[in-house]
Image (spheres, rainbow, N blue to C red):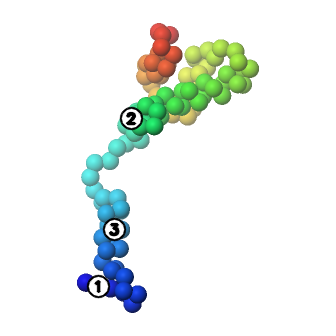
Amino acid sequence: MSTGDDGHDDRHDRDLEEEEAAPASGPRLSEAVRARIPDVRDGLTRVERVVLVTLAETQKELRGRNVPTAMLYGRVVERIDVPKEEFMRVLQRLIGTRV
């Protein structure tokens, strides 16, 4: 067993560091895939969260008035790359009706 001057096992520390380090190779999720995986805390995907935050900010800016869908989509696209069809599906899921 390799111990330092203080009697501490240096090999154990190296083993822990190796376990915590990211693997040099292996499958990696792209940012686009990760943006569409639901978060365990609330079940929202990153796309859904961006839509909700953008909607809240725009409603505040418009002093509580309804936000046109085209305006919302334009502002969402400034933050995250999302196709129009997916945006509409997310919006329908969030509000619970067809747009």
N-terminal label among 1 and 3: 1
Distance from disc 1 to disc 2, alpha carbons, whole Å, reads 44 Å
Contact? badges 1 and 2 (CB < 8 Å): no
| Quarter of the image where the N terminus is located | bottom left
> Is any part of residue 35 visible from this angle?
no
Q: Which residue is disc 1 drawn over? A: 2
For this orientation, the residue located farthest to the top is: 98
Contact? badges 2 and 3 (CB < 8 Å): no
Which residue is depicted at the point 43% across and 22% down? 86
26 with respect to 34 (left or right)? left
Q: Which residue is disc 3 drawn over? A: 16
Q: Which residue is disc 2 drawn over? A: 37
Q: Quadrant of residue 32?
A: top left
Q: Give the camera-side residue of 90 and 83.
A: 90
Distance from disc 1 to disc 3, alpha carbons, whole Å, reads 15 Å
Q: Amino acid at mark 3?
A: Leu
Q: Quadrant of residue 50?
A: top right
Which residue is depicted at the point 39% across and 90% down? 5
N-terminal label among 1 and 2: 1
Badge 2 local density, few (<14 within 10 Å), some, or many (20+)? Answer: few
For this orientation, the residue located farthest to the bottom is: 5
Which residue is depicted at the point 31% across and 74% down? 12
98 is higher (above) or lower (below) than 40 = above
> Is any part of residue 72 visible from this angle?
yes
